[in-house]
Image (cartoon, rainbow, N blue to C red):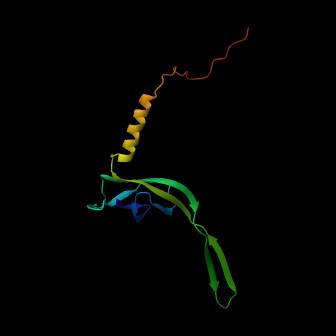
Amino acid sequence: MTYAVIRFGGRQFKLSEGEKFQIQRQKDSKNEVLVYGDGENTEIGTPVLENYEVKLEKIEDTRDKKIRVGRFKSKSRYRKVKGHKQPISIFKVVSIGKKGAKSEKKAEKKAEQSEVAKDTKVKDAPKKRGRPSKKKEE
């Protein structure tokens, strides 16, 4: 089982492929790989592994569960209660591996698609680009 420890958004996560996790709202999915392991071998960065990458896909931006924030002072009848929902982003791990290396599954799918495309390829007339010409009525 392939896993990686990444630094993302000021926190560290141990992740494997297909796993979902949530973090405080993030604009992009830039991260740094600190540790990579494939079950047999483990590589540890000093501090970062430059030749490995973890591809993340943002699923949604949402808000976390509501928490109660209360203030209280004894003997003075002072009580205030507020609620807060933290904005979060939910990410999914698409792939873990070396930089530039395509996954085997994707390569196989592309090969199958190209073979099917060659067999069923039909020549179409070239498509015209731009606006359609207006015919003047005389």
Q: How many numbered dots are placed on residues in this image? A: 0
- Given residues 26 and 78, the one toward you in this image is 26
Left or right: 138, with 50 as reference point? right
Q: Quadrant of the N terminus?
A: bottom left
Against 17, residue 138 (above or below) is above
Against 104, residue 42 (above or below) is below
In percent of width and height, residue 101 lies at: 33, 46
Q: Residue furthest bottom?
A: 75
Q: Residue at x 33, y 49 (%)?
A: 99
Q: Residue at x 40, y 33 (%)?
A: 115
Q: Residue at x 39, y 44 (%)?
A: 106
Q: Residue furthest top?
A: 138
In percent of width and height, residue 7 lies at: 39, 61
- Given residues 24 and 15, the one toward you in this image is 15
In percent of width and height, residue 138 lies at: 73, 8
Left or right: 62, with 79 as reference point? left
- Given residues 17 and 128, the one toward you in this image is 17
Instruction: Please indicate, yes or no, whether residue 25 appears anywhere in the rendered image.
Output: no
Q: Quadrant of residue 71?
A: bottom right
Instruction: Please indicate, yes or no, whether residue 110 appears anywhere in the rendered image.
Output: yes
In percent of width and height, residue 94 lies at: 43, 53
